[in-house]
Image: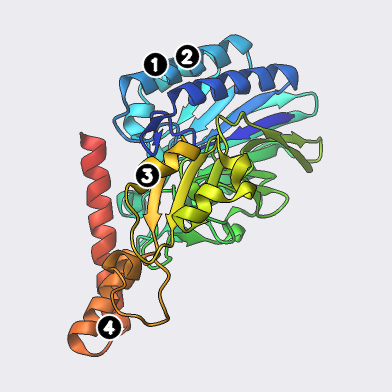
């Protein structure tokens, strides 16, 4: 059976205030063409279809168009909700849409109930594990402590239990939206971690033939059987080295996996430039980046006059301008934002305790802080879904 694995469409998202709807529509067309040209048997979409719980109308219309075009192909599609989606909104009408061959899996209670498709070698069971926010689903899965590994492990126990009841030789595919240990993140994913507790080991998914992951935006293979497709479009400059693609996966009669990458259309190249304003404006080696979307970091000791306007004369698609003046080590005056760069909320809170008290938090206190951040994140999730 030939599968096309994609995820993280983030319909409705902009790139530094530049609308991506045209590029997203182009991707949907490319997806449909790929399904047709490569004789795909099933499409799997591993979450974050939308960029937010209440997407703009244009994003909803594009999703509707995608559903109709996929249904017209007669190729089954299995989708799950991600941490950006409202599972309840995305799942509206799932029963009716199911009849058209579009299988939306947004209810955690259905993790152990697969979509079963068949080819010449027998059945393939597709299990959809939507994003599982631990604080909201721990009761459903009967886990005492809310944690990503615990709830995913419980969901996979249901998958393996159902698979054990099926005919010998039934192959299996799991769709999941999670941060799996070994994956390389970027700046554009919404943080689901608190002190690293959101990372789950690959071993959680043992016992199935292929795991189609979503959440991280870089295409990557954690093992031959466990892969992220990544997002089809860039959503931050941290993705400037990404090769945006989908996985074309062949599942043979024995459940062995072979996969190749299918490149996605690139609306415009990304470039991260660094140097003084004079150097960026004069360096001939930067000529290839003149039509790219540019993030420029200026290292001038003194901020130059009208830097954005001057950069735009050479790089008209400059979208982000940062300042990082070259200073001697330990020079005072480093900005608060720079001191906090790349630090999590948990780390910032622990640093504050250390600053105020003179000693860092102990293990119990770190646990209290972590639980507080988890409670806030869960409350934010509930409020967003309820909007």
Query: Helix, strand, or loop for circle 2?
Result: helix
Residue placed at 65% from the left, 25% from the top?
42
CB atoms at circles 2 and 3 under 8 Å apart?
A: no
Q: Provide residue 171's location: percent of width, then percent of height.
A: 71, 38
Mark 2 lies on residue: 65
Which type of secondary structure does the marked residue at label 3 adopt? Answer: helix
Q: Earlier in the sequence, mark 2 or mark 4?
A: 2
Residue to which mark 4 is pinned: 361
**How many C-alpha atoms fall within 10 Å of the one at disc 2: few (<14), some, or many (≥20)?**
some
The residue positioned 50% from the left and 20% from the top of the image is 25
Question: Who is closer to the viewer here, 99 or 80?
Answer: 80
Q: CA distance from mark 4 to mark 1?
A: 49 Å
Pointer 1 residue? 61
Query: In the figure, residue 181 lies in which quadrant?
Result: bottom right
The reply to whether callout 3 and callout 1 are in contact (CB within 8 Å) is no
- Crowding around mark 3 (Cα neighbors within 10 Å: few <14, some 14 to 19, many 20+) is some
Q: Earlier in the sequence, mark 4 or mark 1?
A: 1
Badge 3 or badge 4: first in the primary sequence = 3
Is 361 in front, or is 153? 361
Q: Nearer the viewer, mark 3 or mark 4?
A: 3
- Please state the horizontal and vertical placement of residue 277, each as a whole percent of the image: 45, 54
Q: Residue at x 21, y 42 (%)?
A: 383
Q: Determine which of the numbered discs, if any, sits on residue 308 in the image.
A: 3
- Crowdedness near tag 1: few (<14), some (14–19) or many (≥20) residues, C-alpha within 10 Å: few
The local secondary structure at tag 1 comes to helix
Q: CA distance from mark 3 to mark 1?
A: 35 Å
């Amino acid at each position: 059976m030939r599968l096309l694995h994609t995820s993280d469409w983030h319909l409705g998202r902009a790139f530094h205030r530049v609308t991506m709807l045209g590029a997203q529509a182009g991707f949907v067309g490319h997806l449909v063409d790929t399904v047709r040209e490569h004789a795909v048997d099933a499409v799997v979409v591993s979450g974050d279809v939308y960029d937010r719980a209440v997407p703009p109308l244009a994003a909803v219309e594009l999703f509707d168009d995608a559903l109709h075009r996929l249904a017209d192909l007669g190729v089954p599609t299995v989708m799950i909700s991600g941490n950006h989606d409202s599972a309840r909104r995305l799942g509206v009408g799932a029963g009716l849409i199911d009849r058209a061959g579009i299988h939306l899996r947004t209810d955690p209670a259905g993790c152990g109930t697969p979509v079963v498709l068949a080819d010449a070698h027998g059945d393939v069971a597709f299990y959809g594990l939507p994003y599982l926010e631990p604080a909201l689903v721990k009761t459903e899965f009967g886990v005492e402590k809310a944690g990503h590994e615990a709830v995913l492990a419980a969901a996979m126990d249901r998958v393996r239990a159902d698979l054990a009841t099926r005919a010998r030789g039934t192959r299996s595919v799991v769709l999941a939206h999670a941060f799996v240990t070994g994956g390389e993140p970027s700046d554009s994913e919404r943080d689901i971690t608190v002190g690293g507790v959101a990372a789950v080991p690959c071993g959680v998914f043992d016992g199935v033939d292929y795991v189609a992951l979503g959440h991280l935006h870089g295409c990557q293979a954690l093992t031959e059987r466990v892969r992220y497709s990544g997002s089809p479009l860039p959503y931050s400059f941290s993705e400037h080295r990404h090769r945006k693609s989908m996985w074309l996966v062949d599942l043979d009669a024995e459940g062995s996996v072979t996969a190749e990458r299918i490149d996605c259309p690139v609306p415009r190249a990304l470039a991260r430039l660094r140097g003084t304003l004079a150097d960026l404006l004069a360096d001939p080696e930067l000529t290839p980046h003149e039509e790219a979307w540019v993030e420029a970091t200026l290292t001038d000791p003194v901020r130059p006059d009208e830097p954005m306007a001057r950069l735009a004369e050479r790089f008209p698609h400059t979208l982000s301008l940062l300042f990082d003046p070259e200073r001697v080590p330990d020079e005072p005056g480093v900005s608060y934002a720079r001191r906090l760069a790349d630090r999590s909320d948990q780390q910032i809170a622990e640093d504050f305790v250390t600053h105020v008290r003179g000693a860092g938090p102990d293990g119990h206190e770190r646990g209290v802080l972590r639980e507080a951040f988890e409670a806030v994140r869960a409350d934010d999730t509930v409020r967003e879904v309820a909007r």
